[in-house]
Image (spheres, grey):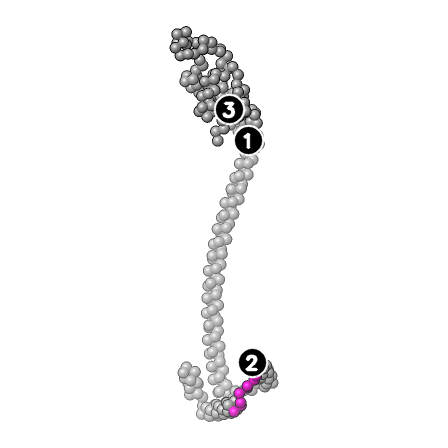
Amino acid sequence: MGEVRAGGEAAAQLSEAAQSELLELCEEQFAQLEKLQNEIILCGPDICASPQEQSVNRLLATDAELKQWLSVQPSLLAANSEILLEAGKDEMLKLCSDLEMVVSCCEAKRDKLRETKELEHKWLEEKKQVLLAANDHIERLRVEKEKYSEQNVFLDTKAKIKKMTVYQEKLMESLGDILEKHAPLPQDESSASRKKKNIPQEINEDLISLSEILEVLMNKVINTPHDPYITLDHTFWPPYVEMLLRYGIAARHKENNFKIRLETFF
């Protein structure tokens, strides 16, 4: 309807001679269209045995039509300048509408690219900040590495070992005090008390304390871990040895009952 209304408005602006000439051209085109339509109707349908033959025929027909259009010489729509002017105006309006649509699409694409550019710029700034932070961290580590040289590490380790040795000595002293208080060596008592308790008359004076037994066991494990057993002799008081074995502090050799070692506590 819009095209018909635009064509009517364009025809109203033309002179009578131009209108009559335009009408004659339209009648000629309609007559040619009717002729072609009648020829198509009268022409029988293309019946082929196989779809492949139909495709070949259509291809040949299309090729022939293309050659015909290429051989046709372009001609003017009409000789009247008023008709050509109106036709040119109509084509220019259509072209302007198409160009406006293209401009709108380009502007939308430009806005999208601008938004993408802003996001990429923001991402780049964040990565730059991360890179600066990483470089600062690397520089700080390098300075710390130069500050703590091998000599400093050696001195630090030596101080820690000394501290641990002092702490171990304090622990051993505390352990000795506790064992001396709660597990003292056997002492000579009166004959009446010994008879009452059925304790032998003679007590070996070479007996070592419980703390010394533990120290011997620990030193043996540390110095010779492949052979942690010690041999029991007359200096080891049997009740102490039995107490260590009973409470799981020491373990007896499987083949030799006179050898014990410190139990593994892990």
Residue in the image at 46% along x and 66% along y: 108
Q: Nearer the viewer, residue 210 or 84?
A: 210
Which disc, if any, is residue 252?
Answer: 3
Looking at marks 2 and 3 on the same chain, the residue that comes earlier in the sequence is marked by 2
Q: CA distance from mark 3 to mark 1?
A: 42 Å
- Whether pointer 1 and pointer 2 mark residues with C-beta atoms closer than 8 Å, the reply is no
Looking at marks 3 and 1 on the same chain, the residue that comes earlier in the sequence is marked by 1
Which numbered mark, 1 or 2, is in the foreground of this view? 2
Helix, strand or loop at mark 3 = strand
Looking at the picture, how far across and down is residue 197, in whole percent?
Answer: 40, 12
Residue type, mark 2 in image: Pro
Residue in the image at 49% along x and 55% along y: 121
Residue in the image at 49% along x and 56% along y: 120
Query: Taking the image as drawn, is residue 173 in sight?
Result: no
Q: Is residue 48 magenta?
A: yes
Q: Nearer the viewer, residue 29 or 136?
A: 29
Residue carrying label 1: 153
Residue carrying label 2: 51
Residue type, mark 3 in image: Arg
- Range of residues picked out in magenta: 42-52
In which quadrant of the rendered image does the N terminus lie?
Answer: bottom left
Q: Nearer the viewer, residue 134 or 203?
A: 203
